[in-house]
Image: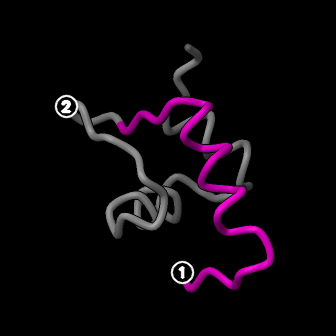
Amino acid sequence: MKVLKTKDLMEIFGFSRTKMYEVLQKGIIPATKIGGEYIISEEVLNEWFKRNQGKKIKL
């Protein structure tokens, strides 16, 4: 299983560190926080993309 960290998510979404943490703290993306780091499996992120395809996500 591949696990993505905050830095990986920043690259995928093109967000700054501040914006990415804001999105993660709001629970918009279903990541898990361990210590000071958010992580999410690639599989869960892909499922999230599928569920939200065509939807407008309010940030």
Q: Is 27 displayed left or right of 10 in the figure?
A: left
Q: Does the magenta segment cover residue 40? A: yes
Residue at 74% across, 55% down: 14
Residue closer to the observer: 11 or 49: 49
Quadrant in which residue 16 is drawn: bottom right
How is the structure coloured here? one colour
Work out whether mark 2 precedes mark 1 in sequence or the reverse, and give the earlier one. Answer: 2
Please name the residue that numbered disc 1 is placed on.
Answer: 59
Residue closer to the observer: 38 or 47: 47
Q: Amino acid at mark 2?
A: Gly
Q: Is 54 displayed left or right of 57 in the figure?
A: right
Q: Which residues are magenta?
A: 38-59
Q: Give the CA separation, mark 2 to mark 1.
A: 24 Å
Whole-percent x and y of residue 52? 67, 68
Residue at 55% across, 13% down: 1
- Asked if the residue under mark 1 is in contact with the one under mark 2, i.e. CB atoms within 8 Å, the reply is no
Q: Does the magenta segment cover residue 41? A: yes
Whole-percent x and y of residue 32? 32, 41
Please name the residue that numbered disc 2 is placed on.
Answer: 35
Residue at 47% across, 60% down: 18
Whole-percent x and y of residue 15? 65, 59
Quadrant in which residue 43 is drawn: top right
For residue 4, above or below residue 50? above
